[in-house]
Amino acid sequence: MKNWSYCLVVGILSGALILGAGYGITQAQQRDETHLKVATSNTSGTWYIVGAAFTKLFQEKYPSVKWNVQSSGASVENCRLVGTRQVQVGYAMSDVAYYAYKKEREFKARGFDNLRVLLGGNLMHYHLVTRNDSGIRNIRDLKGKKIYWGTPGSGTHLMNVTVLEAAGLKAGVDYTGVHLSLGDAVEAIKDGDIHAIGHCSGIPIPGIMDLFTTKDSRFIEIDDETLTGVSKKHFYWPKGAIPANSYAKQDKDVPTVECGTVLVTNTDLPVDIAYAITKTVIENSKDYKVVHRACEDYNIKNTIKATKESGIPFHPGTEKYLKEKGVL
């Protein structure tokens, strides 16, 4: 599954950048070696697989551009990495990017007003899953259980704590939160070492697909009262649904909360490179929705939405493209 998703995004971006300098990267930049790093998620998450495609893309089309993808703790870590200029691009949940830019919540000690929006992407949905033989059906059945929390300080971690709290379950009192990578969490639930996984990412999540295809698994019901409570308190997490047939034996929509994806960069990224990335992804993503449904979400609409939700300005390269398209 990982190789399948990797090939998808490689195809999207490789086909997109065939036009070379016409997409914004100048001949001079192609001659001078440029090193770019992109921070994604853990290796079982959607962002890592999507981000890994950039490596092959730039190696084939722009040998002088060295794009290195790296796994990470996702949103919170990525915003810090981009803000401190350790990487040039990072995937983040819209709410995390918002607080990083505004110097609030987990970024009270240090915010990053040098962040800029490069692209807006796929919606992410909160997944709460368990094995069928666990006896867990409703979110309140998780009392006294061990739950995968995500990596420390990640957007998934924060969402887990928030959703469970809305259901009346207090961390460390009513349940035990376990910090693992998603890949390790999938293996842990298969072995019976934990009872549930709560994870927010784009559909389909490779790790969750693995679980559903190798073990008889199910979504844990989150009642509307809980979902409404979360959405009212956190406007950036509106109610949504995981569409039926997103995973094996899932024959109906699953009510949940969702969040947007924003690709953040910083003010140091050259305008021409930002312009090229924005243009190529937006103008070619629809062709690959048959391979991965998230691809068509990297479009103009969601890029504009990303800056509204995060409160972060566009990078000048992104702004240049959007003005050319007449949408700004």
Image: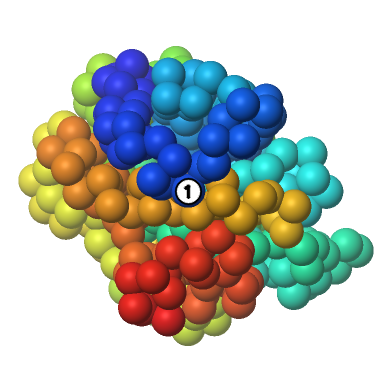
User: Tag 1's secondary structure?
Assistant: loop
Q: Nearer the viewer, residue 135 or 106?
A: 106
- Say above or below: 316 vs 188: below
- Say above or below: 294 vs 180: below
Q: Nearer the viewer, residue 86 or 40?
A: 86
Q: Which residue is mark 1?
A: 24
**Image quadrant for the N terminus?**
top left
Q: Which residue is at a point 18% across and 33% down the rendered structure image?
A: 291
- The answer to whether residue 120 is visible is yes
In the picture, measured across the screen, residue 131 lies left or right of residue 118, that is left
In the picture, measured across the screen, residue 40 lies left or right of residue 249, that is right
Q: Which residue is at a point 28% across and 32% down the rendered structure image?
A: 15
Residue 11 placement (x, y as % from top left): 28, 28
Task: Please tell me how many numbered marks the rendered image carries.
Answer: 1
In the picture, measured across the screen, residue 81 lies left or right of residue 217, that is right
Residue that lies at the very extreme toward the front in this rendered image: 27
Q: Nearer the viewer, residue 144 or 124?
A: 124
Residue that lies at the very extreme toward the right in this rendered image: 109
- Say above or below: 75 vs 15: below
Residue 220 placement (x, y as % from top left): 32, 49
Is the residue marked by circle 1 packed among few (<14), some (14-19), or many (20+) residues within 10 Å?
many
Q: Quadrant of residue 60?
A: top left
Colour scheme used in the picture?
rainbow
Q: Nearer the viewer, residue 5 or 300?
A: 300
Q: Which residue is at a point 54% across and 35% down the rendered structure image?
A: 27
- The answer to whether residue 237 is visible is no
**Image quadrant for the C terminus?**
bottom left
Residue 65 placement (x, y as % from top left): 59, 27
In the picture, measured across the screen, residue 37 lies left or right of residue 188, that is right
Amino acid type at circle 1 is: Gly
Q: Which residue is at a point 27% across and 46% down the rendered structure image?
A: 285
